[in-house]
Image (cartoon, coloured by chain):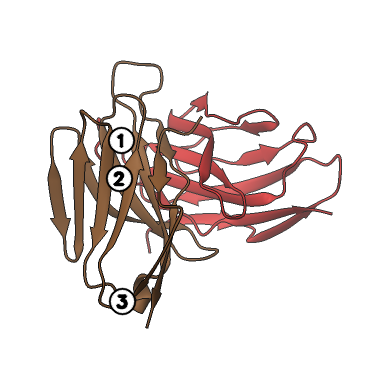
Chain colours: A red, B brown
Amino acid sequence: DGGITQSPKYLFRKEGQNVTLSCEQNLNHDAMYWYRQDPGQGLRLIYYSQIVNDFQKGDIAEGYSVSREKKESFPLTVTSAQKNPTAFYLCASRYYGGGNTEAFFGQGTRLTVV
Amino acid sequence: SQQGEEDPQALSIQEGENATMNCSYKTSINNLQWYRQNSGRGLVHLILIRSNEREKHSGRLRVTLDTSKKSSSLLITASRAADTASYFCATDWPAGGTSYGKLTFGQGTILTVHP
């Protein structure tokens, strides 16, 4: 089945730790995105990438890092510099042949600082 | 900052009634998209309207776009309890700038449809 998979579903982080959230897609999509969602809030863009080995900062990139070494993978690292990382993280991908395409979302990773 | 802002933040209606949600944005767009999110899940795409289109239909959904007012609306007709969810608009930034390919979302409208 084609789709976009995020893992793990739940993640607990201790203060001062870096953690990496996984996002894999087998849809052959060019573009991939990471969003953060706080309770009762909308989605805020962290990073996005349109091609392998290239990515751009979104609106709230501080304290996060990404890599795009393969087309199908776009992992997000939440670093210790991110002071309030507890949130729901969503990954998305879409075909990008010039725009006007829909995004497909994973089921999310809920990160909690303990 | 987020590109899209939705109104109202919450909407409560009875089954069979229509639900209208509005979205306003700030800069030029390539297209505007609407998504639905059930609690604690990922988003699901509903409909996309291009910047040169004014109205689009899909089943019980009707979307309008007014680029002069930088606003869009989503109408769900004859709502059902199963339509209960959060609805988000997303703006797709146009070509020609450094933000090409950027897809930004609004705060969302929480819709509750009572049986």
In the picture, the disc for residue A8 is: none
Residue A84 quadrant: top right
Percent position (x, y) of residue B63? Answer: 21, 50
Identify the residue under disc 1.
Answer: A96
- The residue depicted at 64 percent of the width and 47 percent of the height is A21
Q: Earlier in the sequence, mark 3 or mark 2?
A: 2
Q: CA distance from mark 3 to mark 2?
A: 22 Å
A85 vs B100: above or below:
below
Identify the residue under disc 3.
Answer: B80
**Label 1 is found on which chain of the structure?**
A
**Label 2 is found on which chain of the structure?**
B
Q: Secondary structure at mark 3?
A: loop
Which residue is nearer to you in this view: A23 or A100? A100
Which residue is nearer to you in this view: B71 or B40? B71
Q: CA distance from mark 1 to mark 3?
A: 34 Å
Q: Please state, as top left, top right, bottom left or bottom right, where the C terminus of chain A lies in the image.
A: bottom right
Residue A50 quadrant: top left
Judge the density around disc 2: few (<14), some (14-19), many (≥20) Cα neighbours within 10 Å: many
Identify the residue under disc 2.
Answer: B33
Q: Amino acid at mark 2?
A: Gln
Q: Confirm whether residue A51 shows in the render.
A: no
